């Protein structure tokens, strides 16, 4: 259970919760409907009954159509994507169409229905101004709602990053892995001192990257791939009948990403590919096509399935959550498993 100090301000404030919480969604929709209805039905009458009530209902539907079109189509499609010219032109178009509908309705009631009209003058300027007010109000509501959600997402990301870094320091390299590597180096110092030196350099690079370089918000993708290559090279030294491949397609140099996005998949691939009976492998593919970075990790499966533990599932859950926070709506993760292989497909739109 969280302490009161740990609860974000957004979760404490009813006013902010009202704009983002799903449990208040119905009330958020009823509020503008009630406000617009009250404004229309309290306005000065233009027609006699029953045309008056009918015209007010039509106007209510028209105003709601304008408000919801702006909130759920124009703002997300144009304003959130910084397409300001397209958004402003769309608003002008909506105002023009609304004024045309208003003018056509006026003509219909005045000439074709031939009911008594209490005010003869038709002035589209006040009507257009009211439409503009509703559009502006609905836009500001949507922007305010988006700012609250973004603020909460940033807070959550910062906390998740901090927790991830703390967890990372606790579990940098498993003691079992280091123990095996140091034993291998000890043997190599007697048989092949040059190779032992290479192993120590790779191990040093790997630890340096995890301890220092990966603490930044962004790293070069090539550096992250080099880290994975060092990890797999060390694994190859300590395991017989193990092979790996790292394929790189596209212009990857200069591309920056969040650090350590792929290591969880590679660690799981290495762990679950161990086979005492036959050769095992891990194949990594990086492909940059336009703004889309595609990562694929394929590993062989042993004849006898490895015992699953909670740590691998927790690591996978953590990396999924990181992807949701770092690349919302621009990343997709697909995991496929068959009798012989386990495949991870990750696509990130950068």
Image (cartoon, rainbow, N blue to C red):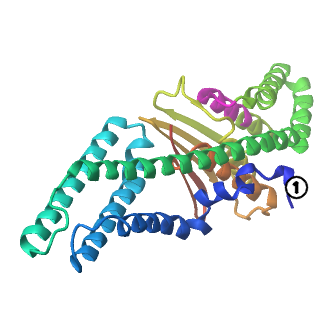
Q: Please indicate, yes or no, whether residue 273 appears anywhere in the rendered image.
A: no
Q: Quadrant location of residue 49?
A: bottom left
Of residues 86 and 232, the one nearer the viewer is 86
Residue at the (69%, 59%) spot, across then down = 14
Q: Please indicate, yes or no, whether residue 33 appears anywhere in the rendered image.
A: yes
Of residues 98 and 205, the one nearer the viewer is 98
Q: Quadrant location of residue 255?
A: top right
Q: Is residue 224 magenta?
A: yes
Residue range in magenta is 217-231
Q: Quadrant of the N terminus?
A: bottom right
Element class at badge 1? loop
Residue at the (34%, 52%) spot, across then down = 130
Residue occupied by mark 1: 3
Residue at the (88%, 37%) spot, across then down = 178
Of residues 267 and 92, the one nearer the viewer is 92
Image coordinates of residue 265 in percent, x first then y, are 67, 48
Residue lying at the far left of the rendered structure: 111
């Amino acid at each position: 259970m969280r302490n009161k100090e740990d609860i974000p301000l957004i979760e404490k404030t009813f006013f902010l919760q009202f704009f983002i919480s799903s449990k208040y969604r119905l009330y958020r929709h009823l509020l503008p409907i009630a406000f617009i209805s009250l404004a229309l039905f309290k306005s000065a009458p233009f027609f006699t009954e029953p045309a008056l009530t009918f015209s007010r209902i039509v106007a209510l539907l028209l105003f709601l159509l304008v408000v919801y079109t702006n909130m759920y189509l124009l703002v997300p499609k144009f304003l959130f994507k910084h397409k300001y010219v397209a958004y402003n032109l769309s608003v002008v178009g909506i105002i023009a169409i609304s004024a045309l509908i208003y003018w056509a309705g006026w003509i219909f009631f005045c000439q074709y229905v031939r009911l008594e009209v209490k005010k003869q003058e038709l002035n589209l300027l006040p009507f257009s101004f009211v439409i503009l007010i509703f559009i502006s109000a609905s836009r500001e509501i949507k922007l305010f709602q988006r700012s609250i959600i973004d603020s909460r997402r940033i807070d959550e990301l910062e906390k998740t990053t901090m927790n991830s870094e703390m967890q990372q320091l606790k579990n940098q390299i498993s003691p079992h892995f280091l123990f095996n590597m140091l034993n291998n180096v000890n043997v190599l110092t007697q048989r092949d001192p040059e190779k032992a030196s290479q192993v120590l350099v790779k191990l040093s690079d790997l630890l340096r990257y995890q301890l220092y370089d990966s603490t930044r918000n962004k790293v070069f993708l090539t550096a992250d791939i080099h880290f994975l290559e060092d990890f797999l090279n060390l694994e190859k030294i300590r395991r017989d009948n193990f092979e790996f491949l790292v394929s790189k397609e596209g212009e990857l140099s200069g591309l920056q990403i969040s650090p350590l996005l792929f290591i969880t998949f590679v660690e799981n691939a290495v762990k679950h590919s161990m086979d005492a009976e036959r050769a095992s492998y891990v194949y990594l593919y990086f492909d940059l096509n336009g703004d889309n970075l595609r990562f694929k990790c394929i590993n062989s499966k042993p004849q006898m399935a490895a015992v699953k533990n909670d740590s691998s599932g927790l690591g996978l859950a953590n990396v999924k959550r990181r992807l949701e926070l770092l690349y919302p709506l621009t990343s997709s993760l697909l995991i496929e498993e068959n009798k012989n292989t386990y495949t991870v497909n990750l696509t990130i739109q950068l």
